[in-house]
Each structure stands twice: as C-alpha cells, then as structure tokens.
Image: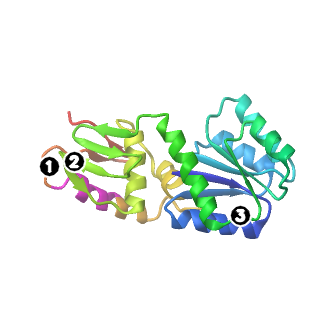
Amino acid sequence: MRILVVEDEKKLATFLKRALKEKGYAVDVAHDGAEGLFLAQENPYDLIILDIMLPEKNGLAVCQELRKEEKAVPILMLTARDDVEDKISGLDSGADDYLTKPFSYGEFLARVRALIRRHRDRKTPVLRVADLELNQLTHKAQRAGKDIELTSTEYALLEYLLLNANQIVTRTMISEHVWNDQFDSYSNVINVYLNYLRKKVDEGFDQKLIHSVRGSGYILKEPS
C-alpha cells in the first residue's frame, strides 16, 4: 500500500509518515499543494492524506482537480478548523473523509484503515495466480491450500507482484510502491526480500511462479 501525505507542517508530516511506515505502508510526502497534485497525478496511490490549508494550492483545489481527472483514489482531508462549512466544502470537493486537528493517533490510523478497506471492497479482494491466493482484506496468503506466513514487507511485495501478474515490474517500480520514493532501487534489499518470498511461495513446488527477468526486473506469472 502506497500513501501520499500532503501537509505543510513538517513536524506533523514527519509524524504521520513515521506512523504509517510502522504499519507497513510506503509513504511519500509533499509540503505544498502544487507538489502534492503533481505526485498524485504521476503516481498510483492507495490513499491521499490532504491538508486543506496549503501553500501554492489549497487542498480543496487539489482534490477538485484530481476528481476532474477521474482519479478514484480515496482522500482523507485534514484541517485545523472545526467548522461545518469547511467539512461540507471538503466533502463536496470530492474528499471521502474528514479529520480535524488535533486528532488522536488511534483515530487517524482507524480512518486510514477504513478508507483503504472501503476502496478495496469495491474490487475483488482475492488475488489469484495459478494455485496462489492473496486476500487483500485479511492479508492471508495460501498456495495449494497451505497458509503462507508473511511479514508486512513480504505481504506488500507479493501483493504488488500479484496486482501486476504476468507483467514485468522493474526494481524502481518495486521500490516506489513497496518502500517509498526515497528508497535506493539499486539496494540489495529488494533481492533479499525477493529471495525470502521465493522460498515461501515457490519452495517445494515444481511450478515456480516468481521469476527474475535478466536486465529488466521480475515477474510473477502463470506456469507455462
């Protein structure tokens, strides 16, 4: 899961990023509306956390622009003002939910989970390739009916490979979606986690699903 935080208060942005990363999300941060809009237009996010009072372009304008472009990503709006008119404006601009500062850590994470879950519920929650299954609601994985125990990073990596099944994904694509935009895509960490995943998914099976594509990246595909 990849989340964009658009918040000009740098201490709050850093706190939100740390809190989300601790829960296994990859997080990008923008400190003004123009940068936030650019990132949201260029990258596929699972959720955008968007402050209303932003320099360059306010959150309402960013939200409206994304909805005009038919971006369906869920948007959680943040504001320091607890005003009914602000809430109405935020929701009318296309936001999915609204949270007034200051807010509790627990409520913030609950809103994030609820929005991502609601967005997932509109889609097929179970991803399948051959006899491999991953349930996006329960985060449970199985191959040939046998449970696969995954860490949060392994889950995110397997989910991304399944969402792009039968397509080559590059190291850069993996680093941006499973880690974040600051991650070094040439780091050995990607290889390490791919090896962990191969052992859990393919070990003991004649038909291998996860493959390296020399000079290009990786692919999870149906057996030939």
Classified by dominant secondary structure, the portion drawn in magenta counts as helix
For label 3, the residue is 103
Q: How many angstroms separate mark 3 from mark 1 (CA)? A: 48 Å
For label 1, the residue is 205
**What amino acid does circle 3 point to?**
Phe
For label 2, the residue is 143
Q: Is residue 18 left or right of residue 208?
A: right
Examine the rendered structure and indicate whether residue 61 appears above or below residue 198.
Answer: above
Identify which residue is drawn at 55% across, 49% down: 114
Identify which residue is drawn at 70% across, 29% down: 69
Q: Are marks 2 and 1 in contact (CB under 8 Å)?
A: yes
Q: Earlier in the sequence, mark 3 or mark 2?
A: 3
Pair 3/1: label in front: 3
**What amino acid does circle 1 point to?**
Phe
Of all residues shown, which one is farthest toward the front? 84
- Local packing at callout 1 (Cα closer than 10 Å; few below 14, some 14-19, many 20+) is few
Q: How many angstroms separate mark 2 from mark 1 (CA)? A: 10 Å
* Quadrant (top left, top right, bottom left, bottom right) of the C terminus: top left
Identify which residue is drawn at 78% across, 42% down: 90
- Local packing at callout 3 (Cα closer than 10 Å; few below 14, some 14-19, many 20+) is few
Span of residues in magenta: 194-203
The picture places residue 118, in percent across and down from the top left corner, at: 53, 42
Is residue 219 or residue 125 the one in the foreground? 125
Is residue 77 or residue 57 the one in the foreground? 77
